[in-house]
Amino acid sequence: MDYYQVLNSRQSEDLSVIKRRYQDLLLKHHPDKNGGVESLLFQQVREAWSHLSSPERRQQYDAQLYRAQLDQDSAVWCTLDLTQFRQSGGDYSFECKCSGVYEIDQEQLDDLRKDGDSDCLIACDSCSLSVLVTLDNR
Protein backbone atom coordinates (compact mmCIF):
# COMPACT_ATOMS: atom_id res chain seq x y z
CA MET A 1 0.00 0.00 0.00
CA ASP A 2 1.33 3.42 -0.98
CA TYR A 3 0.50 5.77 1.90
CA TYR A 4 0.75 8.86 -0.29
CA GLN A 5 -1.65 7.38 -2.81
CA VAL A 6 -4.13 6.42 -0.08
CA LEU A 7 -4.16 10.06 1.08
CA ASN A 8 -4.32 11.42 -2.50
CA SER A 9 -1.00 13.15 -1.89
CA ARG A 10 2.51 13.38 -3.26
CA GLN A 11 5.78 12.73 -1.46
CA SER A 12 6.92 16.31 -2.08
CA GLU A 13 3.90 17.87 -0.35
CA ASP A 14 4.07 19.64 2.97
CA LEU A 15 2.62 17.89 6.01
CA SER A 16 -0.14 20.51 6.34
CA VAL A 17 -1.42 19.66 2.83
CA ILE A 18 -1.34 15.93 3.57
CA LYS A 19 -3.12 16.53 6.88
CA ARG A 20 -5.98 18.39 5.14
CA ARG A 21 -6.43 15.50 2.71
CA TYR A 22 -6.33 13.03 5.60
CA GLN A 23 -9.04 14.96 7.46
CA ASP A 24 -11.24 15.18 4.34
CA LEU A 25 -10.91 11.44 3.68
CA LEU A 26 -11.49 10.59 7.33
CA LEU A 27 -14.75 12.54 7.36
CA LYS A 28 -15.87 11.13 4.01
CA HIS A 29 -15.25 7.48 4.95
CA HIS A 30 -16.03 7.62 8.68
CA PRO A 31 -18.21 4.72 9.95
CA ASP A 32 -20.92 7.20 10.98
CA LYS A 33 -21.28 8.10 7.28
CA ASN A 34 -21.40 4.42 6.26
CA GLY A 35 -24.11 2.98 8.48
CA GLY A 36 -21.68 2.19 11.30
CA VAL A 37 -19.42 0.05 9.09
CA GLU A 38 -15.70 0.80 9.18
CA SER A 39 -14.54 0.44 5.58
CA LEU A 40 -11.17 -0.87 4.47
CA LEU A 41 -10.39 2.55 3.00
CA PHE A 42 -11.08 4.20 6.37
CA GLN A 43 -8.58 1.81 7.99
CA GLN A 44 -6.02 2.47 5.25
CA VAL A 45 -6.42 6.24 5.64
CA ARG A 46 -5.76 5.96 9.38
CA GLU A 47 -2.74 3.69 8.83
CA ALA A 48 -1.28 6.00 6.17
CA TRP A 49 -1.67 9.02 8.44
CA SER A 50 -0.02 7.19 11.35
CA HIS A 51 3.09 6.76 9.18
CA LEU A 52 3.16 10.11 7.43
CA SER A 53 2.25 12.32 10.41
CA SER A 54 5.43 11.39 12.30
CA PRO A 55 8.55 13.05 10.82
CA GLU A 56 10.71 10.04 11.75
CA ARG A 57 8.30 7.46 10.35
CA ARG A 58 7.75 9.54 7.22
CA GLN A 59 11.50 9.82 6.66
CA GLN A 60 11.87 6.04 7.03
CA TYR A 61 8.97 5.45 4.65
CA ASP A 62 10.39 7.90 2.10
CA ALA A 63 13.75 6.12 2.28
CA GLN A 64 11.99 2.80 1.69
CA LEU A 65 10.23 4.25 -1.37
CA TYR A 66 13.53 5.65 -2.64
CA ARG A 67 15.26 2.26 -2.31
CA ALA A 68 12.37 0.56 -4.11
CA GLN A 69 12.58 3.15 -6.90
CA LEU A 70 16.33 2.55 -7.26
CA ASP A 71 15.72 -1.18 -7.57
CA GLN A 72 13.19 -0.59 -10.36
CA ASP A 73 14.96 2.15 -12.28
CA SER A 74 18.42 0.78 -12.82
CA ALA A 75 20.68 -2.18 -12.63
CA VAL A 76 23.00 -1.48 -9.71
CA TRP A 77 26.25 -3.26 -10.37
CA CYS A 78 27.65 -2.78 -6.88
CA THR A 79 27.96 -0.48 -3.90
CA LEU A 80 31.19 1.48 -3.57
CA ASP A 81 32.67 3.87 -1.08
CA LEU A 82 33.83 7.18 -2.53
CA THR A 83 37.35 6.36 -1.31
CA GLN A 84 37.46 3.60 -3.95
CA PHE A 85 37.20 6.20 -6.72
CA ARG A 86 40.30 7.64 -8.38
CA GLN A 87 40.58 11.35 -7.63
CA SER A 88 41.99 13.79 -10.13
CA GLY A 89 41.61 17.42 -9.14
CA GLY A 90 37.96 17.85 -8.24
CA ASP A 91 36.79 14.83 -10.24
CA TYR A 92 36.25 11.28 -9.01
CA SER A 93 36.09 8.30 -11.37
CA PHE A 94 35.76 4.52 -11.23
CA GLU A 95 36.06 2.12 -14.16
CA CYS A 96 33.00 0.04 -15.02
CA LYS A 97 33.31 -3.63 -15.96
CA CYS A 98 32.37 -2.57 -19.54
CA SER A 99 35.44 -0.25 -19.57
CA GLY A 100 33.17 2.79 -19.28
CA VAL A 101 33.49 5.24 -16.40
CA TYR A 102 31.43 6.34 -13.41
CA GLU A 103 32.20 10.00 -12.73
CA ILE A 104 31.21 12.62 -10.20
CA ASP A 105 32.75 16.02 -9.52
CA GLN A 106 33.38 17.89 -6.29
CA GLU A 107 30.56 20.37 -6.91
CA GLN A 108 28.03 17.54 -7.23
CA LEU A 109 29.39 15.94 -4.05
CA ASP A 110 29.13 19.22 -2.16
CA ASP A 111 25.50 19.62 -3.28
CA LEU A 112 24.66 16.06 -2.18
CA ARG A 113 26.24 16.57 1.22
CA LYS A 114 24.53 19.94 1.63
CA ASP A 115 21.21 18.18 0.99
CA GLY A 116 22.08 15.63 3.69
CA ASP A 117 22.53 12.69 1.32
CA SER A 118 24.77 9.87 2.49
CA ASP A 119 24.86 8.05 -0.85
CA CYS A 120 24.12 8.58 -4.52
CA LEU A 121 23.56 6.58 -7.68
CA ILE A 122 25.98 7.16 -10.56
CA ALA A 123 25.34 5.83 -14.06
CA CYS A 124 28.07 4.47 -16.32
CA ASP A 125 28.85 6.65 -19.32
CA SER A 126 28.88 3.59 -21.63
CA CYS A 127 26.34 1.03 -20.45
CA SER A 128 23.12 0.76 -18.44
CA LEU A 129 24.77 -0.15 -15.14
CA SER A 130 24.95 2.12 -12.11
CA VAL A 131 26.83 2.07 -8.83
CA LEU A 132 25.54 3.14 -5.46
CA VAL A 133 28.23 5.32 -3.91
CA THR A 134 28.50 5.82 -0.17
CA LEU A 135 29.76 9.32 0.50
CA ASP A 136 32.47 9.95 3.05
CA ASN A 137 32.79 13.07 5.18
CA ARG A 138 35.53 14.78 3.17
Image (cartoon, rainbow, N blue to C red):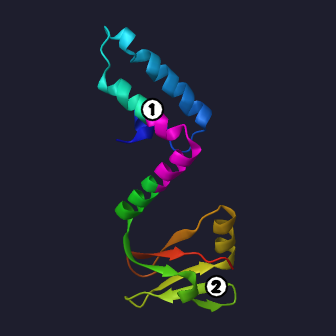
Q: Answer left or right for 51 relative to 34.
A: right
Q: Amino acid at mark 1?
A: Leu
Circle 2 sits in a helix, a strand or a loop, which is it?
strand
Q: Residue at x 32, y 19 (%)?
A: 38
The residue tagged 1 is 7
Tags 2 and 1 in contact by the CB under 8 Å rule? no
Q: Amino acid at mark 2?
A: Asp
Q: Is residue 23 above or below residue 10?
A: above
The residue tagged 2 is 91
Q: Residue at x 41, y 34 (%)?
A: 47
Magenta span: 48-63
Quadrant housing the C terminus: bottom right
Quadrant housing the N terminus: top left
Q: Answer left or right for 20 relative to 65.
A: right
What is the quadrant of residue 128 in the picture?
Answer: bottom left
The x, y position of residue 71, in whole percent, is: 36, 63
* Disc 1: CA contacts within 10 A as few (<14), some (14-19) or many (>=20): many
Residue 79 visible in image: yes
The x, y position of residue 92, in whole percent, is: 60, 85
Is residue 53 highlighted in magenta?
yes
* Disc 2/disc 1 C-alpha distance (Å): 43 Å
